[in-house]
Each structure stands twice: as C-alpha cells, then as structure tokens.
Image: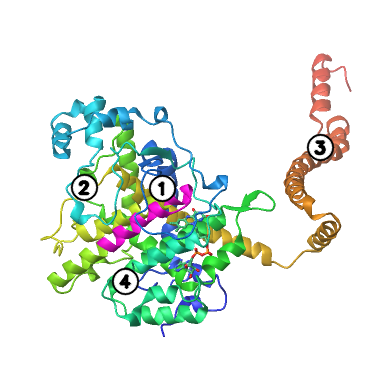
Amino acid sequence: KKQTVMEANDPWKFEGDTKHAIPDTSEATFGAIKDLNERVSPLLKDLTEKSDYMRFYRLNLFNKECKYKMDDNVFCGSNACNVVITDENNVPDIWSSRALGKLEGFMPELSRQIVESDQSVMENVEKISQSCLLERLDDQDRQYCYVDNELDSGCVYVSLLDNPERFTGYAAPHATRIWEMIYNECLPDTSEPTIDFPSLFMQGSLAPPSNSQENMLNERMDMWTNEQRVFYRVLSGMHSSISTHLCYNYLNQSTGVWGPNLNCFMEKVLSHPERLENLYFAYSLLLRAMDKLNGHLDTLTFCHDSALQDTEVRHKVRDLVDTVDQYPRYFDESVLFNGDPELSSAMKKEFREHFRTVSALMDCVGCERCRLWGKIQTNGFGTALKILFEVPDVENEIDQFESTSFPLQLRRSEIVALVNTLDRLSRSINYIQKFHELYIEQHQPESMFRKVLNSMKRFVYQYVPEVFHPYLKKTYNVARIFYHDFWMELEVVLEGFRYVLSSYLKLPSMINFYFFSSESPLLNYMSESIRQRIPSGWLP
Ligand SMILES: Cc1cc2nc3c(=O)[nH]c(=O)nc-3n(C[C@H](O)[C@H](O)[C@H](O)COP(=O)(O)OP(=O)(O)OC[C@H]3O[C@@H](n4cnc5c(N)ncnc54)[C@H](O)[C@@H]3O)c2cc1C
C-alpha cells in the first residue's frame, strides 16, 4: 500500500510538506502548491473581482431540462439557493442581447479578418461584438463539456460577485444522488465489475463509504488506467473544493450568523486524505492548462467595448500565465492517451463523452446557486481538458499532438469559466490555511481569563431559555467586537497619556535648566544683553 504524508497523526501536517508527491501529479507536493498559490492567488483575485469580463457569466440557468431520471424530490427552499440575475443594462453594451441579436449568420473567421485588417475596429462596437462571440466554433468533436450557447434566448447574465459560492442547505438525498451519478461516469462502459467504483461509492443506502471502503477504493484505483484515475480525481477535487467553500462560507442556521465551520470542513474533507490530495491534484491540472495558454494568448479575444479594457484583461491574463510558467509543471498531460494511436483516440473519445455527461448532469442540480457554480466549474475543467489534450504545446519542439491538434479557439464563456474555476480552487487552498489557523486558535491552552469567560458563558446559556440563545450569540458577537475595539482605542489613549505624563515629569528639570542653571540660554542671553548696554569700565 502506498505510504502518503496524509497518514501521519497530525491532520494538518500535509500543509508544508515538500517531500511526498501527490499521486498522479508530476512531483507536486502540498508545500510546493501552497507556495505557488501564494503568488497566483492575488492575481486571480484581481482578475475575477476587478474586471467586468471575468465577472459576468452568461448561461442558461433556468430553461434547460434535466435529461436524466431523478426520483427524489428536490428541496432547496432557502434564500441562499437563489441566484441574483444581472439586468442587461448593467452589463457592457457589447454583450447585451441587442448586440448578440445582430450576430445571426456570423462566422468567427470573418470577424477575425475584420479585426486583423482594420485596427480602428476597436472603436466600432458592432464589429467587435462579432469578434467577441466565437459561438459557432467548429469544435464539437473536441469539446469536453456542453457549453450553453450565449445566443440562446434562455440565457441570462449573472454577476459572479453578487452570487458567491457558499452554503445553501442543498443536501441529501437529491444532492448526494447527483454526486453518485457524477461518479458513475468515472468508469468506461466496458469496465470489469472488479473495479466497479459506483457500487463501492453507494454501498448501503446512500451511505458514505466507511474508512475500510476508502482503503478499498485506493487499492482498486491502482488497477485503473491513468486516464480513469485523472477523470475521477478531477471530479473528486472539484467536489472537495465545493465542500471547502460551503464549509468556509457557512450559515449557522440556529444563530443566523455566516462564518467558517471548522467541523464541517474536517468532516467533509480533512478527515479523508484522498479528497484533500484530489483537490491539490485538480488545482495542478488547471494550472498546467493555464500554463499551456503560453504562446496561444494572441489568438484569444478579451473583447470589451473599450480597447483599453480589452488590453487590460489581456495583460492581467498574461501576467497570470507568466507567473505560472515560472514554476515547474506539476501535471504532465503527455503521459495520458499515449499508447497505440487508434486505442488512445478511442479512449479520448470516451473520456470526452463521459465528461460531457457530467456537464449535462449540472442541469439536474436542484439548487440554483449550486447549479450556477456547478456549471461554471464543469465548464472550467472541460476547457482545461480541451487545452491539455487537444491543443499543441508550443513550448515543446517535438510536439506529439501535432498531427491531431488544432489551433486554440475559446468562447468567452470558456475563458471566464477557466479563470473562475482556477480562482475557486486557489481560494479553497487559502481557506484550508485559514481553517488551520482557526484550529490552532481553538486548540491553544486556555488562559485564566478565557477560562473564567467561558464558564460565565456556559452558566448564562444554562439558565437562559433556548429560544433566546440566537440573540445571546449575536449579543456575544457584538460584545466581542466592542471589547476588541475598546482595547484598541484604550491602547491609543494610553499612549497619549504616557506621552503627556512624561512631559510633565520633565518639567521641573526644564524649569531648572531654563531659569536657574548657569547654562540657561535665556539667562545667558539676558545677561549678555544687559552687559552690552552698560558702559565699559563701569562694572568692576
Ligand atoms: C454540482 C453540485 C454543486 C453543489 N454546490 C453546493 C453549494 O454551492 N453549496 C451547498 O451548500 N451545497 C452544494 N451542493 C451540495 C453539497 O455538495 C453536498 O451534497 C451536501 O452538502 C451534502 O453533503 P454530504 O456531506 O451529505 O455528502 P456529499 O457532499 O453529498 O457527498 C456524497 C458522498 O460522496 C462521497 N464524497 C464526498 N466528498 C467526496 C470527494 N471530495 N471525493 C470523493 N467522494 C466524495 C462521500 O461518500 C459522500 O457520502 C452541491 C451539490 C452538487 C451535486
């Protein structure tokens, strides 16, 4: 059995580890990925939060039917499940349906020619909008994801900043059933029953696999092909990231307070080492896809209704790609689909079809907010897989993809999904660090003062009826903030007081110096002035 760093006793030991490679990566360690993320994360934050291009996503969120049979009733009645739609007047004109409506019969090659032949095109919104929408790409055979066509009238614009990924309350049995269906796609139809992951996943009635089952999964995964393992790890990594987000942005339903829930994270992710590994694996895979954009960036259009913003987004993406490029490649796509060409091509086709089914399953997710982020992230991973397996590596002289590869073309929604998915996973890694800090804080030995405070808290909670507990919790939180601010303010006041007091204490010696000492500048000045006015020889 493979020894991994995760098996050590301390559940957080993995974080700085630079010795043990994460399975199926190219020598990526938790520590190396954490270092890289520290550089990449601020760039992603800037790109996703400060540019309209990356912020607005157009998708068919409400009008696509679920193609699969779902027996369970959906239940996601909370407000947290809702998605706030962006009014079209608030998105740049270039992307409005008015502009999109003019694009009937549009051919991407034609628009490319227009842009290339006429530099002044940047001032012309109509022409640019044509270059912005590469919807009719001739790439259906190479797609790993069903992407909503932005020209569909059922599509809406959503600002991703207005709809953060967070806890919604969407849960079993419906949500768990979707995960089961997603994981069922991990196996090719011809798989032998001995490596039948679905039956392992769902042993018992929707029961989570016990630890022994997880060990069994690890053993069985060793029998899978590289491609099957990568497929599974991408999905499991995405699942871990979704769990990390919902546990970090968690709603405590009894108090109504949003905040990180350490137990939730420990239960869903940290206590399952393999899920954590898969999160870092999936991040490595996305980073490699981003890195592979190097050399292809000039073929992409970051269209905007101002040439300035187009250039700004392009520069920021280039900065991101260059930064990733400075680090080693932690995922090596060349070890996949590299056997007998005919067999590899058939395997790749199967891989694509299974991933497309996963993306179609997102239309069955029974909570709007979860569906939104599920669709973005499957599109993001689908785009990464397309870049990895269908696009030539321009930095590699002996290009093994040469004969089958095609020049990179990406739709706006694919670029937005890729960058935002990378950002999701990057944030998950930051959240893990924050969860660790929280863990340390909670497990530090209690000070005397805190002990007294905690026993007072327990005493109050014991005697106050339960119905008032949410108000108590809120009052406690406000009091804590007030207490914190009070001490900060007091510190400033004390600093001032110390300064004034020390000045007063210096006063007697100052008076002595200025009025009575032989070096007093004042007395010496006065005596010198008097001396000059007295006729010489008059004094003895
Ligand atoms: C596409 C999608 C998006 C979602 N988005 C959100 C959201 O934004 N906010 C929200 O609150 N809820 C969301 N949910 C629901 C959420 O993911 C969980 O299903 C829900 O919180 C119930 O969690 P659970 O602990 O019962 O197990 P689930 O997370 O439902 O997992 C089901 C089973 O999968 C296995 N499993 C769990 N994690 C992994 C992993 N990383 N790798 C491999 N196997 C695993 C375990 O056996 C587990 O019992 C989403 C669900 C789906 C399908």
Q: Is residue 107 above or below residue 89?
A: below
Mark 4 or mark 2, which is nearer to you?
A: 4
| Residue at the spot of label 4 | 187
The residue beneath circle 2 is 409
Q: Which residue is mark 1?
A: 43
Q: Determine if the magenta segment contains residue 366.
A: yes
Residue 23 sits in quarter? bottom left
Q: CA distance from mark 1 to mark 2?
A: 23 Å
Tell which circle, 4 or 1, labels the residue nearer the N-terminal end. 1
At 31% across and 54% down in the image, what residue appears? 290
Alpha carbons under labels 4 and 2: distance apart? 29 Å
Instruction: Give how far apart the Cα atoms at labels 3 and 1 are.
Output: 46 Å
Left or right: 406 as drawn, with respect to 435: left
Q: Position of residue 140 (x, y in %)?
A: 20, 52
Per the rendering, the mark at residue 500 is: 3
Question: 10 Å neighbourhood of mark 4: few (<14), some, or many (≥20)?
Answer: many
Label 1 residue near ligand 1, CB within 8 Å: no
Which residues lie in the magenta part? 353-373
Q: Amino acid at mark 1?
A: Leu
